[in-house]
Image (spheres, rainbow, N blue to C red):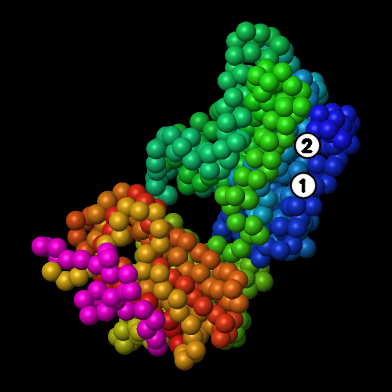
Amino acid sequence: MSFNTFIKSLSDISEKRLMYTLIAIILGIDVAILVFSDGYSGGSYSVMHYQFARWAFTNPENLLNSWANPIFTLLAAPFALLGFKSLQLMNIILGILSGYFAYRVAKELKMKSPLLALVICSFTPVFMMTFYGGTTEVMFAFIAILGTFLLIKNKFFVGAIVISLLPLIRLDGLILLPVYAIYFIRWRKIKFLPLLLSATVLYSLIGMLFGKDLFWLFDGVKIWSDSIYGHGSFTQFIVRSPGFFGIPNEIFFVTGLVAGLWLYIRERKEYSREFVLVVLPFVIYFLAHSFAWWQGIGNSQGLSRYMAAIVPFMAVMATRGLYLFAKMFFIIFKSEAVRIGALILGFASIIHIPFAIQNYPVSLSSADWALSDAAEYIKANGLDTKKIYYTDPAIFYFLNKNPKCNSCIEVKNADQLKTMKNSDLLLLDVTFANINGISTDSILYSSGFKLMQAFNPETPVQIFGKPYFVALLERSDIDPLTMLENQKILSGANKSYATLVKYDFDSSTPTDTSTVSTSKINRTAYFRIPKKKMNYLVTESKFDTINPIQPITFKVSYKQFRKTSDENLRYFVEAISNGNTIYNKVFEVGTPAQANPDEWHDLSFVLILHNIEVTPELTIKTGFWNKRKGEFLIDDYRVEVAVK
């Protein structure tokens, strides 16, 4: 069979059969990833949404919690009863359905090769990764694209009801209601406009029946609130979009957007539906979040996953862009086979990109490992029956307990700590403590709280400019010695370490001494990392004569002089057994927020390798990795491992 004949045979496959085949393949890939994943995306917020849904039938008040988003909790509750993976499966199904309705929208708008929308939507990096969490963006995306489809099909009544659900899945759905209102006004269907608020009004009244005020859905919402999460550039989402949309999708989307706008300008009547129901929802949502992060309002964290909510709209616009990309090849080469080949090439690049820039299967994040270790410690020491005060509800996912149990008390302000009695436990994390205005230092260095254990993330994580960790404390009588013992635990002085690597670059140096030097300012020798993309100070360690604790815990310390103030150095750790890499992490090492770029700084961090069995074949490789943009000086470099 010739290539041209093969390409023609592909084009003869019925669209419906190809659609079912694609859905089956996408579902198979997503479910396989789910089965082999032991973690989740979205961090603690995923777990908190899961817990609200998981315990909704035990604690019915969860169904009327404004933060948890009532419609999301209601629809997710039956899935969550079966566990977190069941909730993730719900997101996978909704994600694929979002792609399906993106395809149907593209088809109704008479776009060529509309099935591309299904593929683009399903394999957009930020959308695909969000499948494996418990946050609300995927359900929001499904409802939004379903509403658009219903309006295109002139089902105004049902469409308005469906769209009214958006603010109860994510409160920023209110941003899109005026956009859809424009469509009703444009098509002279003003009588359906009140229905856009039907779900909000209904839930407001239901809440009042259970003792809430009329505006309970907006409890805790402060649009012009202080920027507790910080703020950034207005163009941040634009700059980062190739990372969360994927470069191929970005190219096709921009091409499709420009082409669509040009068609709208030329033939406004024919393309007005596409402009109002596809282009405007995407643009308005994108700009609203850009503005919120720029101004630091609405409690915006500037997270990439926010953009997952509008991926189906992007997929519809990118469908036209990919078709035009392929048509360009037809115009150049005058060959249908070349056009189909270009489509396949674009198709392959779309499928490839999420696996190239994200790690699948999904594992626990570095910070979530700290919570997991804390839960294991609590269970191993029989502490889960005690009264637990906590700042991050996600701990109860790892404890497999209802966070609203009688002995579980969420700490939302420092005054609540005054109600603690001796032997009560406090599980304190840096993130939520800062959000709730609780000073971690005042508690950790208090003589009335005994630090039982501190749990570090897998690799260093900075939260609000501070190192992230989780601390388990016990309320105790006032004792001046308590503060000293707490300091020992925090510094790691209560553990024994064996030195694996020690270079002062004067008396002890690495094998490669070509970059060891001194200067007029620094008389002692140091190691220079130039602006060259490669690994430095690479060492391999085995555990033939030492007995490390589990999980394997490393402490890395060194002095650093950062000659380029806008770049951070990276560190890597790799575990190799029988010639196979069984663990590999690369992460950025930040410098203190108040660091002066013209000074030496003492840096140290902890690395924790979970589920790594110590065998004679195990080798741990560590070192620095430079991304070629920065220049650094390193001195007094030491790597230690905690031993029994």
Q: Amino acid at mark 2?
A: Tyr
Task: Decide if residue 74 is in sight here.
Answer: no
Q: Taking 319 as reference, is 425 left or right?
A: left
Q: Between residues 80 and 335, which one lies in front from this camera angle?
A: 335
Say what secondary structure mark 1 lies in: helix
Total marks placed:
2
Please say if 511 is above or below 355: below
User: Foreground mark, 1 or 2?
Assistant: 1
**Does residue 363 show up?**
yes
Residue 522 placed where, x, y %? 14, 66
**506 part of magenta stretch:** yes
Q: Is residue 265 above or below residue 241?
A: above
How packed mark 2 is, by other alpha carbons closer than 10 Å (few <14, some 14-19, many 20 or more), is: many
Which amino acid is tagged 1?
A: Ile
Span of residues in magenta: 496-522
Q: Quadrant of residue 327?
A: top right
Q: Is residue 321 magenta?
A: no
Using the image as rendered, state which of residue 562 and residue 311 is in the foreground.
562
In depth, the one of 565 and 179 nearer the eye is: 565
Query: Which residue is depicted at the point 81% across and 43% down?
Result: 23
Image position of 412 (left or right of 605): right
Viewer-closest of 445 and 308? 308
Q: Which residue is mark 1?
A: 26
| Magenta residues, dominant SS class | loop
Please indicate whether residue 169 sits to the left or right of residue 175 in the image: right
Q: Position of residue 385 (x, y in %)?
A: 61, 81
Q: Residue 251: give x, y in percent of width and height.
A: 57, 31
Mark 2 highlights which residue?
A: 100
